C-alpha cells in the first residue's frame, strides 16, 4: 500500500433518492449523460483521476488543489437542472491500493461534501489556503466545524452563491500563476534513499507555504514521473517549471544538487549545489529546505520577468503586467516606483478579484514613505493602510499581507503592532527570507537587538542573494 499527499474531491447528487422516486429512468439517463458529456471530460481537462463511482457519488484525485477547485466549479456550473451536485475538497494524506484511495484525507473530503449547499463547494482550510487569489471565486469562512468521525475540529470555507466562474466569452483577463512540479529527489550514491525521500517531503511542505506559485505535489504525480520522467510528467500536468534534486552521501557529508527546469522549453532556469554535514539528518533537511524554497521562489519570479522583458504591454495578460510592475518596483527609485504603481492600478482594474496587485500597490506607498520621496498624495500612509486592512479582512492567512501591514504600522510609529504583524508573516511562511528579514527589521525598530540579529542572520543564511 502506497501513501501520498493528494487533492481529493468528493461529489454527490443532491436529493438523489427523491429524483429516482419521481423518475427513475429519466434520472439515470440524465446522470449518465452528465457523466459522459461533462464530468469525465472536465476531470480529464484538469488532470484529475476518477477513483470510483458510487451510484450518485464520485471520488476524484488531483495532483493540484487549484486544479481540483477549478474542475469543481466547472462541474457545478455546467450541471443542468434537475440534477445538482454538492462537492467537498480536501488536501491531505491518502493511502493507495490497486488504484483506490483510503484514509483520513478521503473521509474529510466526504464530510466536507455533506456540508456544501446544493450546487456549492466546501473546502478545508488547508485546501483554501492554497487556492486563495488563484481561482475566480470568493470564499465564505464558515468557521470551525465538527466533522463526523474526524477527531479535531476543522475550519471550513464555502464558495459564495454569486461566485461562480465567468463563462467563456466574458471571462476577465487570464491570470497565469506559475505551477511547479516537485520531482522526488534521487539518491546517487551511499545510503541516501531515505534522506532523499525525507528531503522531498519536507521541501513539498515548505513550498506549499508560498503564495507566488502553485505547487503540484510529487506524491500525487508519482506514477506519471516514474513512467514518463519529470519533464514529460510536468508538461502533462500543466507545470510551468519542474524542480529536480539529487543527493550524494559520503564520509559524513551530503552534496545536494537542485535545478529548476522550464517544463515546456526544457532549459535550466536555476541550479545550485549545496554541501552539508550529514550527521544531523533533521538539521540537514531543515537547512536545505529553507535554502532551496526561498531561493527558488526568487528564481521563479526572475524567470517570469525575464520571459516577458521584450514584449510590449499590449501583448501581456494581467499576471504578466503585474510581473512587469514588480520589476519596476524593485528598482527602488522615485520615478520607477510611480511607473510600477501605474502597472498595478491597471491590473486592479482588470482583475479586482486578486489580492496581489492591491498588495503591490500598497508597497509602492510604503517604499515611497520609507524612502522620504515626495508624497504622491497627502494621505499616502492612511490610504495604503486602508488598502491592506481591507486585504486582511479577506486574507488573514497571507504572509505577504501581514508583512506589508507590519511595515506600514511601523512607519506610523506603532512598534508593537509592527512586530506582531511581522511575526505573523514569519509564522505563516518561515521558509521565505523576506518574512524573516521583515520580522528581524521590526524587532530592530522595537529595540529587541539580540532577537533582531538572530532573525536577520537567519534571513541571510537561507537566502544569501536577497537584496538588503
Image (cartoon, rainbow, N blue to C red):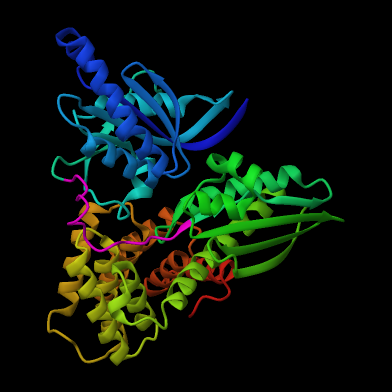
User: Where is residue 43 drawn, in percent x and y?
Assistant: 38, 37
User: Which quadrant holds residue 422?
Assistant: bottom left
Q: Residue at x 65, y 42 (%)?
A: 227
For the residue pair 145 and 80, the one nearer the viewer reads as: 80
Q: Quadrant of residue 114?
A: top left
Q: Which residues are magenta?
A: 163-179
Task: Please tell me whether residue 119 is drawn above or below residue 335 in the rendered image.
Answer: above
Name of the residue lying farthest toward the right: 251
Viewer-side residue, 92 vs 6 = 6
Instruction: Describe residue 414's horizontal placement relative to residue 349 as left or right.
Output: right
Q: Give whichever of 452, 16 is nearer the camera.
A: 16
* Residue visible at 26% across and 78% down in the picture: 343
The structure residue drawn at horizontal position 21% and vertical position 39%, both measured from the top left corner, is: 77
Residue 184, image x, y percentages: 64, 48
Q: On the picture, is 58 further left or further right than 389? A: right
Q: Is residue 184 left or right of residue 468?
A: right
Does residue 273 belong to the magenta stretch?
Answer: no
Can residue 176 be found in the magenta stretch? yes
Looking at the rendered image, the quarter that the N terminus falls into is top right
Q: Can the viewer see residue 134?
A: yes
Q: For residue 112, say whether it is visible.
A: no
- Above or below — where is 272 with respect to 334? above
Most common secondary structure along the magenta stretch: loop
Q: Quadrant of residue 16?
A: top left
Amino acid at each position: 500500500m502506497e501513501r501520498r499527499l493528494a487533492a481529493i474531491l468528493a461529489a454527490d447528487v443532491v436529493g438523489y433518492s427523491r429524483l429516482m422516486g419521481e423518475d427513475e429512468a429519466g434520472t439515470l439517463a440524465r446522470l449518465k449523460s452528465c457523466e459522459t458529456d461533462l464530468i469525465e471530460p472536465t476531470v480529464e481537462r484538469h488532470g484529475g483521476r476518477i477513483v470510483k463511482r458510487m451510484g450518485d457519488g464520485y471520488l476524484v484525485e488531483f495532483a493540484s488543489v487549484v486544479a481540483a477547485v477549478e474542475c469543481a466549479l466547472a462541474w457545478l456550473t455546467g450541471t443542468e437542472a434537475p440534477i445538482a451536485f454538492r462537492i467537498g475538497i480536501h488536501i491531505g494524506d491518502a493511502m493507495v491500493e490497486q488504484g483506490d484511495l483510503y484514509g483520513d484525507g478521503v473521509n474529510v473530503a466526504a464530510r466536507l461534501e455533506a456540508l456544501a449547499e446544493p450546487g456549492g463547494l466546501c473546502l478545508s482550510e488547508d485546501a483554501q489556503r492554497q487556492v486563495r487569489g488563484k481561482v475566480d471565486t470568493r470564499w465564505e469562512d464558515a468557521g470551525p466545524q465538527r466533522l463526523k468521525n474526524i477527531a479535531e475540529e476543522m475550519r471550513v470555507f464555502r464558495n459564495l452563491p454569486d461566485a461562480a466562474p465567468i463563462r467563456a466569452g466574458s471571462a476577465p483577463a487570464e491570470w497565469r500563476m506559475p505551477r511547479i512540479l516537485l520531482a522526488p529527489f534521487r539518491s546517487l550514491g551511499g545510503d541516501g534513499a531515505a534522506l532523499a525521500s525525507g528531503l522531498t517531503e519536507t521541501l513539498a511542505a515548505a513550498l506549499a507555504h508560498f503564495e507566488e506559485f502553485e505547487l503540484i505535489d510529487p506524491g500525487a504525480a508519482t506514477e506519471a514521473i516514474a513512467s514518463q520522467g519529470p519533464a514529460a510528467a510536468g508538461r502533462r500536468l500543466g507545470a510551468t517549471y519542474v524542480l529536480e534534486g539529487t543527493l550524494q552521501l559520503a564520509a559524513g557529508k551530503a552534496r545536494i544538487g537542485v535545478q529548476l527546469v522550464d517544463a515546456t522549453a526544457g532549459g535550466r532556469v536555476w541550479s545550485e549545489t549545496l554541501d552539508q554535514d550529514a550527521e544531523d539528518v533533521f538539521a540537514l533537511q531543515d537547512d536545505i529546505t529553507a535554502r532551496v524554497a526561498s531561493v527558488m521562489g526568487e528564481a521563479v519570479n526572475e524567470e517570469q520577468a525575464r520571459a516577458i522583458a521584450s514584449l510590449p504591454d499590449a501583448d501581456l495578460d494581467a499576471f504578466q503586467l503585474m510581473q512587469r510592475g514588480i520589476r519596476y518596483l524593485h528598482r527602488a527609485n522615485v520615478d520607477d516606483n510611480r511607473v510600477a504603481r501605474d502597472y498595478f492600478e491597471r491590473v486592479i482594474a482588470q482583475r479586482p478579484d486578486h489580492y496581489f496587485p492591491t498588495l503591490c500597490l500598497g508597497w509602492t506607498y510604503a517604499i515611497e514613505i520609507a524612502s522620504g520621496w515626495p508624497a504622491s498624495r497627502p494621505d499616502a500612509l492612511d490610504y495604503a493602510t486602508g488598502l491592506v486592512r481591507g486585504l486582511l479582512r479577506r486574507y488573514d492567512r497571507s504572509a505577504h499581507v501581514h508583512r506589508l501591514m507590519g511595515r506600514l504600522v511601523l512607519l506610523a510609529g506603532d512598534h508593537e503592532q509592527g512586530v506582531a504583524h511581522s511575526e505573523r508573516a514569519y509564522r505563516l511562511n518561515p521558509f521565505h527570507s523576506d518574512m524573516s528579514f521583515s520580522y528581524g527589521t521590526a524587532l530592530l525598530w522595537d529595540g529587541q537587538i539580540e532577537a533582531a540579529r538572530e532573525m536577520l542572520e537567519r534571513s541571510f543564511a537561507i537566502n544569501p542573494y536577497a537584496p538588503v
